[in-house]
Image (cartoon, grey):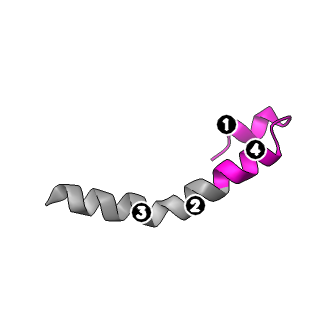
Amino acid sequence: MLILIYSGYYLSKLPLVLENLNLLSQSKKHHANFFSP
């Protein structure tokens, strides 16, 4: 049952993660952005 909760949590975070990865790929030369939340 806990797995379902975690799955729902990560699925809700997925768009945010993909957006962050997209921003990182666009600004690879700015290494400081990689470490900021």
Q: Could you give the CA–CA distance between mark 4 and mark 3, rounded to whole angstroms?
A: 21 Å
Secondary structure under the numbered disc 2 in the rendered image = helix
Q: CA distance from mark 1 to mark 4?
A: 13 Å
Q: Is residue 7 left or right of residue 26?
A: left
SS assignment for the magenta stretch, majority:
helix
- Image-quadrant location for residue 3: bottom left
Residue at image point 84% right, 37% down: 30
Label at residue 11: 3
Residue labelled with disc 4: 25
**Residue kind at label 4, given as amino acid type:** Ser
Residue labelled with disc 1: 35
The residue under the point 67% across, 37% down is 35
Q: CA distance from mark 2 to mark 1?
A: 16 Å
| Quadrant assignment, res 29 | top right
Residue nearest the observer in this picture, 32 or 5: 5
Q: CA distance from mark 2 to mark 4?
A: 14 Å
**Position of residue 4 measured from the top left corner of the image (x, y, whole percent):** 23, 62
Q: Earlier in the sequence, mark 3 or mark 1?
A: 3
Marked residue nearer the N-terminal end (2 or 4): 2
Query: In front of the other: label 2 or label 1?
Result: 2
Q: Nearer the viewer, mark 1 or mark 4?
A: 4
Q: Are marks 2 and 4 in contact (CB under 8 Å)?
A: no
Q: Nearer the viewer, mark 3 or mark 1?
A: 3
Residue at mark 2: 16
